[in-house]
Amino acid sequence: MPGIHIRDFRAVDLPDAAALLAARQVRDREQLPFLAKAYEEPRECEPLLRQAISEPAYGGGVAALSGDTLVGYLLAEKNLFPPTSLPAQFIPPYTMSVGLQCHAVSSAVDAVEVYRAMYAAAAERWVASGFFEHRVYVIAGDRDAEEAWVTCGFGRGLTCAVRPTADPVSVAGELPGLEIHQAASEDLDVVMRLEHTNNAHHWGSPIFWPYLHETQPAAREHQANLLAEAANAHFVAYRDGVPVGMDTFNAPDWVNPMLQGGRMIYLFQGVVEEAARGGGVGKALLARSMAWAHEQGYDWCALHFASMNPSGAPFWRGQGFVPVEHTMARRIDERVAWARP
């Protein structure tokens, strides 16, 4: 690209990179004002970047310069989770990820072309190292960023969305035979049965997420730990004594801090048995859950849904969840490792 030079990212670039990130947050908050205002300040952004390049999993970075001026940066993280761990259920092995705070481009240049140039330089190294799965996290509505990654072969896989807990959930009224109870540790088997329903749904078309039996012990341990802590509520809906749906909550550890503009809770799983879908169970669960979250002093509830989920995506958006971040992904044909000129 004429006038733009790509080189390795250096620690000396941190202040300028933080300024680019803060400027991006200003632009993003113009369309999504509930994002974290603190990150409009470079001094708040720099620790995020310093941490990124200090992590053992740091996968290197590139910088884009126009003359001596930094106009873009791209930092990567190696996702090498053990195959029996809980994250392995959601992130493919040997994934190279670019977090929301780990990229930004100046508004003074063509963002699409700068992103493309940085990715071309970074991806060459990733593929040479055996990382064929690439991910990048972008703010929903950032058209230049999405255009850049789409033209590089990326597509949406996951969407993070938030809603105010104080907003009412519209329900049709009492549902005969339906009761909602907060689960406790002794309900672990019920929780795991409904988790199985959720995972089986995501295994099907058109989502096609793998159902990894190897991660089930870790998933059971995770749910047991959540149930042991009162702050991590699980609400289970029963119809005539039979569990038909569930909402589970935990701390927003999987939500980027730049998205957290207030006290936030994370909806980890929202599921309704297939035979009970469309009858108001999901809305009833969400109404109970949001009332609890508001009572606990949470301003916002966040969740992730598969972008291609034919039932989940329209349901959550219909209940006031606003997309704030998209996970864009690309898988390289691994035959490139040996099918070469």
Image (cartoon, rainbow, N blue to C red):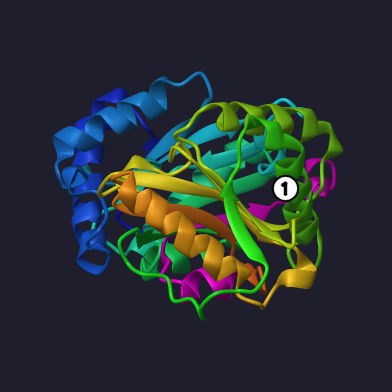
> Where residue 82 sits: x, y (%)?
72, 25
The amino acid type, in three-letter code, at marker 1 is: Glu
Which residue is identified by label 1?
Answer: 195
Query: Taking 153 as reference, is 72 above or below it?
Result: above
Query: Taking 320 as reference, is 187 above or below it?
Result: above
Query: Taking 268 as reference, is 12 above or below it?
Result: above
One can see residue 341 in this view: no
Q: Nearer the viewer, residue 266 or 62?
A: 266
One can see residue 192 in this view: yes
Query: Taking 176 as reference, is 199 above or below it?
Result: above
Q: Is residue 113 magenta?
A: no
Q: Is residue 330 magenta?
A: yes
Q: Nearer the viewer, residue 205 or 50?
A: 205
Q: Nearer the viewer, residue 146 or 337?
A: 146
Quarter of the figure with the N terminus: bottom left
How packed mark 1 is, by other alpha carbons closer than 10 Å (few <14, some 14-19, many 20 or more), is many
- Residue 241 is left or right of residue 123, and the answer is right
Give me the residue at 44% from left, 76% from top: 170
- Residue 226 is left or right of residue 171, and the answer is right
Which region shows up in magenta? 313-341
Give me the residue at 51% from left, 28% from top: 229
